[in-house]
Amino acid sequence: MKSEKSKMLSGQLYNASDAELVKERNYVRTLLFEFNHTSPDEAEKRKELIQRLICAKGSFAIEPPFYCDYGYNIEVGDNFYANFGCVILDVNTVQIGRNALLAPYVQIYTATHPTDPAQRLTGREFAKPIVIGDNVWIGGGAIICPGVTVGSDVTIGAGSVVTKDLPDGVIAAGNPCKVIRSARQ
């Protein structure tokens, strides 16, 4: 029998109230509370706390406040930067490439719920992975929805809601987010 955690990570319906998952989220919330209440001169303490949560492949900086569900499902490449108020609901994997910049209040959601009301009322939910390529800049307040892949060399305009995959080398914006033009024009 699969655990609720293994169902969660495989994209199946799972029970988010499972004791193991609740314990893991509470651990993360405790670390994030400490991270989010550090003073501006405690950069090393912040880095140490975040390294206990996410997999960072190289240099990175995350400004508080920052929020996530589990942390261990987040992988960021070298030279990653997340500005104030970033939320990553990492119920499934979030892979972010090198040189990615997140403006203030970017939200990345892998978590979703059934659209059938009867199924939704059971309290079960599921998640879809998100992949963001190299050299991506995501504008302030943008939302990346479950299951989306953002290519490399992409700029996403502020306030955009990304509901579908974006190819490499484009500028995209809007709600829903659409490709506006090539990034190299």
Image (cartoon, rainbow, N blue to C red):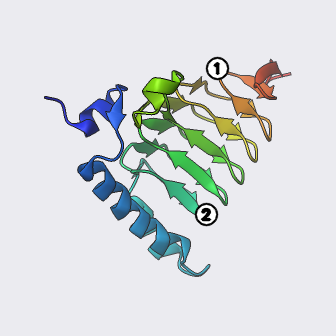
Q: Where residue 162 appears, x then y in whole percent?
A: 68, 28
For mark 1, what is the residue? 164
Query: Residue 105 placed where, x, y %?
Result: 69, 52
Q: Position of residue 101 (x, y in %)?
A: 65, 46
In the rendered view, does 116 fall on the left or right side of 101?
left
Return the residue nearer the eye: 35 or 1: 1
Is 123 displayed left or right of 20 in the figure? right
Indicate the position of residue 50 as horizontal and vertical percent values. 44, 62
Task: Name the amino acid, label 2.
Answer: Glu
The answer to whether residue 150 is left or right of residue 24 is right
- Which residue is painted at 53% across and 57% down in the image? 67
Comes first in the chain, label 1 or label 2: 2
Q: Relative to 128, is 173 on the left or the right?
A: right
* Amino acid type for the residue under numbered disc 1: Lys
Quarter location, residue 11 = top left
Residue 137's quadrant in the figure?
top right
Q: Which residue is mark 2?
A: 63
